[in-house]
Image (spheres, rainbow, N blue to C red):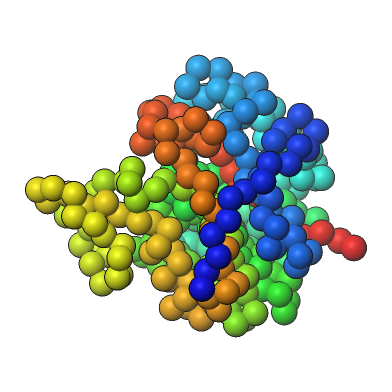
Amino acid sequence: MPRDVTLSAQQRDTLTVYPAANLAELGVDVFVTDRFNGVSAGPFESLNLGDHVGDDEDCVRENRALVAHATGVDTDHFVTVRQVHGARVLDGGSVTDASEADALVTDSPALALAILVADCVPLALVDASSGRVALVHAGWRGLEVGIIARALEGFDTRATHAFIGPSISKERYQVGPDVARYFTSVPGALTPDGDDRSRLDLRLVATRQLLDAGVVDDRIVRSRDVTDGGEVFFSDRAQRPCGRFAIVAKRVVA
């Protein structure tokens, strides 16, 4: 069975981060950031990493530099991409300022990858046989178009370990029939919520898609931590506009 864990905080420089212990054992440093100890103000207070939400650009650059330093790379090797809720996967070494994708992959220990979220599912994948790493941004649109299966192309799925980070809970994620119709075939994903509304369990859908792709169930670890309320992790449902937190991954060179 997939394993659910409560994340433990770790101090890195001035930041508090939440590592994925199951992936550290494979030589990959994966962690999620929270919303604290950055330099942004207002609804983006304070460690906002999103440059598309209306925050001051200089603040975002400084916040990203803080996370890059906590990861052990300079900002030129801290890779983000413009996310569009699609199914495109890019190699981290080929990302440009114009690139659009919702998953990043690398086998280079020189790069730190970062995917930004604020309710959507942040997902890390590590192929233990090759050391290949992927990060995925999986909202309902990405899950519907198969972003997880696309990110796993080229992975040995039987040797792949997965980490699902903090996202919105089923209890806080109400959707209409226009969204629910895509997930009616996933057992347990939808709970009726009056009239034509439903509660959608994004993490359950992501888990199901990992299993369907061939990832072994006991190699899937899911955070119990959620974005609900936006108090620790940014939540677009709780506050709009708001910032974005990150899931970050870097291979560790022994």
**Relative to the observer, which residue lies in front, 247 or 97?**
247
Q: State whether residue 39 appears in this view.
A: yes
**Relative to the observer, which residue lies in front, 204 or 152?**
204
| Image point (43%, 58%), residue name | 203
Residue 59 vs residue 232: left or right?
A: right
Q: State whether residue 142 appears in this view.
A: no
Q: Picture coordinates of residue 106 (x, y %)? A: 68, 63
Q: Picture coordinates of residue 193 (x, y %)? A: 18, 49
Does 62 sit above or below residue 8?
Answer: above
| Image point (13%, 48%), residue name | 194
Q: Residue furthest top?
A: 42
Q: Picture coordinates of residue 23 (x, y %)? A: 69, 62
How many numbered marks have been drawn onto this rendered protein structure?
0
Q: Residue furthest left?
A: 195
Does 108 sit above or below residue 32?
Answer: below
Residue 44 vs residue 236: left or right?
A: right
What is the quadrant of residue 152 in the picture?
bottom right
Q: Picture coordinates of residue 5 (x, y %)? A: 58, 56
Residue 178 vs residue 80: left or right?
A: left
| Image point (77%, 45%), residue name | 71
| Image point (33%, 43%), residue name | 172
**The C terminus is located in which quarter?**
bottom right
What is the quadrant of residue 40 in the picture?
top right
